[in-house]
Image: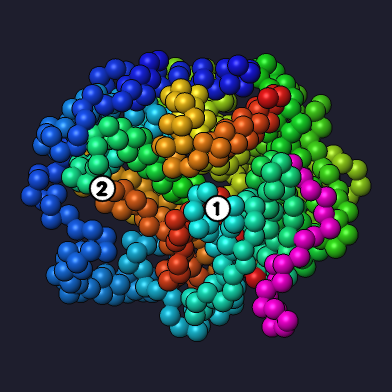
């Protein structure tokens, strides 16, 4: 048995040991009569139940929508955060509401778990129809995009390669081209961002392994790479070992600013948090010292690396959008740090099952798109369904000018849409 | 920790010989803790693990009449728990981090925080960052000690896929842990 196998076996059994024998909660089964009435999802019984509830449910939704609309529009932009049940928010409908939004969004799907092929589908923001799709063999580990196109990092075994996907009218609607970028080790990148002009990609990179003061070995990402999409010329930035004082850092690349040469990133320490610093890297600076080439913009507390990695800075560098407490979306003015809660989804009280009575906070994040000025954003919000299924329904929510709308998109559909993490995190062209 | 409860087959055979209530309750008594442990390893959260296992038994109860053989009940439950954990993790990727921040007591597992050594936490964190199929293959193989054919049956893939997935997963885990496999 190798050392890794040994560590894995020990760790999993130690974790399992926290569950004592005989500590399972009592089994709750429905009474047989109600179980027999349980409709299939697409069965006839399901349709009749749906029909029975259609009128009152529709009326309730309509009333809730009116109330939500009135409550959201009456106040206008103000200090009070917007709130409301995501599924009942008014959908985006008018051209004015859609003005200035990205034209397309992308989803990733796989036919089956076993399929080596992944389908990237592109959907119109406005018509909500699928406009194009491309099938790639390999695992799409990262996908990002802007007006210059979509950029995918695709894992082929141990190596990840980079591709650009663009729309064209002729000769084919979608053009896929491999970028002249040196392959990188697969599964060692968490973030991929393209500069506004499409000339540079930025990503983080795990490793190499190093020992922390605690004696543990980690290869948490401490490297940022910027690479030209045209020539493949790359610039590697690292946190020098001497600067971390043996504690280690996590680096999360957040976004490019509009000058195409400044990269916002979060530095979390020790690896896994709890402190993070938001910094700006000047990618034209000489050398390879990540800290020396960047300046601190904001200190953020209680952020783990993963949480900090979901922050996003507007391209003008004036606004930080981040997930806040209780699943809210928070706007932070930079560099003052003035914080405003933009939207707070309500919690859901579980009605059945072992979690009965427990309030689950519905969450928003990560950010899908942020306007250049940071005044408009589209976020990904989850609404936990009633028990016993407890499944989460996913929505995209548009926050603009003191209003909040539900984007009526198809998100996360398909049997394997979220595995690998789908294009919900993707920027839009 | 004994994982025998989740590893051993059911003692009943023939799905239709006993009423679903009795049969499913008996299976629950026998396997619930083992399956909760399996879900805890995958999810890191006891409350979520209990929900997933409850849901698996609920599904078994509803489909009991269609179950070809009681011998397959445990395999069905294991697959169901894996699917449930995958759903939870998918949702958590996007929104349960927010929930974790809002409900730190529930999601951050104080008992595990105390009992788990930092070394084990590091391994589990690396395990949970693997792609779903790799993570599940490793847990079935190295936590439940299932042979490759049973891992394949549980994951509904071929044995060859299990072996290659396990190999890739170990390599990926070693990279994340900074070790050579």
Q: Which residue is at the front of the view, A323 or B108?
A: B108
- Which residue lies at the image location 18% right of the left edge and 45% below the top edge? B65
Task: Determine the secondary structure under disc 1.
Answer: loop
Reading the chain from its start, which is encountered first: label 1 or label 2?
1
Task: Determine the secondary structure under disc 2.
Answer: loop
Taking the view exactly as shown, the residue that stands out farthest to the left is: A33
Q: What stretch is highlighted in magenta?
A: A165-185
Image height of A20 relative to B124, above or below: above
- Which residue lies at the image location 50% right of the left edge and 40% below the top edge? B158
Chain of the residue that carries numbered disc 1 in the rendered image: A
Chain of the residue that carries numbered disc 2 in the rendered image: A
Q: Which mark is residue A115?
A: 1
Residue picked out by circle 2: A387
The magenta stretch spans residue A290? no
Q: Give percent across and percent down for residue A23.
A: 26, 22
Image height of A31 relative to A346, above or below: above
Taking the view exactly as shown, the residue that stands out farthest to the right is: A286
Quadrant occupied by the N terminus of chain A: top right
* Distance of label 1 from label 2 (alpha carbons): 31 Å
Q: Give percent across and percent down for residue A330.
A: 51, 54
């Amino acid at each position: 048995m190798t050392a890794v196998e040994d560590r894995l076996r020990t760790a999993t059994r130690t974790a399992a040991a926290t569950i004592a024998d005989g500590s399972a909660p009592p089994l709750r089964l429905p009474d047989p009569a109600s179980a027999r009435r349980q409709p299939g999802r697409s069965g006839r019984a399901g349709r009749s139940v749906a029909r029975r509830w259609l009128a009152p449910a529709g009326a309730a939704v309509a009333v809730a929508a009116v109330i939500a609309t009135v409550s959201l529009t009456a106040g206008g932009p103000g200090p009070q955060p917007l709130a409301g049940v995501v599924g009942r928010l008014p959908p985006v409908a008018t051209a004015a509401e859609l003005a200035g939004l990205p034209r397309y969004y992308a989803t990733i799907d796989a036919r089956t778990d076993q399929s080596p092929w992944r389908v990237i589908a592109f959907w119109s923001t406005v018509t909500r129809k699928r406009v194009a799709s491309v099938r790639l063999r390999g695992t799409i580990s990262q996908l990002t995009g802007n007006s210059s196109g979509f950029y995918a990092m695709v894992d082929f075994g141990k190596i990840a390669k980079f591709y650009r996907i663009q729309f064209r009218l002729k000769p084919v609607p979608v053009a896929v081209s491999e970028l002249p970028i040196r392959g990188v080790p697969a599964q060692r990148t968490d973030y991929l961002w393209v500069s506004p002009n499409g000339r540079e990609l930025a990503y983080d990179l795990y490793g190499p392994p190093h020992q922390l003061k605690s004696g543990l070995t980690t290869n948490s990402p401490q490297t940022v790479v910027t690479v030209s999409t045209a020539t493949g010329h790359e610039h590697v930035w690292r946190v020098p070992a001497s600067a971390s004082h043996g504690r280690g850092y996590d680096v999360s690349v957040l976004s490019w600013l509009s000058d195409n040469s400044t990269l916002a990133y979060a530095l979390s320490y020790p690896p896994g948090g709890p402190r993070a610093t938001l910094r700006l890297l000047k990618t034209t600076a000489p050398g390879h010292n990540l800290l020396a080439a960047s300046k601190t913009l904001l200190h953020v507390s209680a952020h783990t690396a993963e949480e900090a990695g979901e922050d996003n800075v507007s391209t003008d560098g004036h606004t930080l959008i981040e997930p806040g407490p209780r699943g809210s979306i928070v706007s932070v003015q930079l560099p003052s740090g003035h914080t405003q809660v933009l939207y707070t989804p309500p919690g859901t009280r579980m009605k059945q099952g072992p979690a009965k009575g427990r309030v689950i906070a519905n969450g928003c994040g990560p950010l899908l798109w942020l306007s250049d000025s940071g005044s408009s954003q589209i976020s990904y919000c989850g609404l936990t369904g009633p028990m016993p299924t407890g499944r989460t329904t996913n929505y995209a929510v548009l926050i603009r000018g003191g209003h909040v709308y539900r984007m009526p998109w198809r998100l996360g559909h398909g049997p394997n849409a979220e595995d690998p993490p789908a294009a919900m995190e993707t920027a839009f062209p | 920790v004994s994982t025998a409860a989740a590893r051993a087959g059911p003692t009943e055979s023939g799905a239709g010989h006993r009423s679903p209530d009795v049969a499913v309750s008996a299976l629950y008594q026998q396997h619930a803790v083992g399956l909760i442990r399996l879900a805890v390893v995958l999810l890191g959260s006891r409350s979520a693990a209990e929900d997933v296992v409850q849901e698996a038994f609920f599904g078994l109860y509803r489909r009991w009449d269609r179950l070809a053989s009681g011998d397959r009940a445990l395999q069905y439950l294991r697959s169901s728990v894996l699917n449930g954990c995958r759903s939870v993790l998918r949702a958590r990727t996007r929104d349960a981090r927010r929930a974790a921040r809002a409900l730190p007591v529930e999601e951050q597992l104080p008992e595990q925080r105390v009992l788990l050594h930092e070394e084990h936490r590091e391994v589990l964190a690396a395990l949970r960052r693997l792609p779903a199929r790799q993570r599940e293959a490793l847990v079935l193989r190295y936590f439940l000690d299932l042979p490759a054919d049973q891992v394949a049956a549980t994951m509904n893939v071929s044995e060859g896929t299990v072996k290659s997935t396990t190999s890739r997963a170990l390599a990926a885990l070693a990279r994340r842990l900074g070790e050579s496999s």
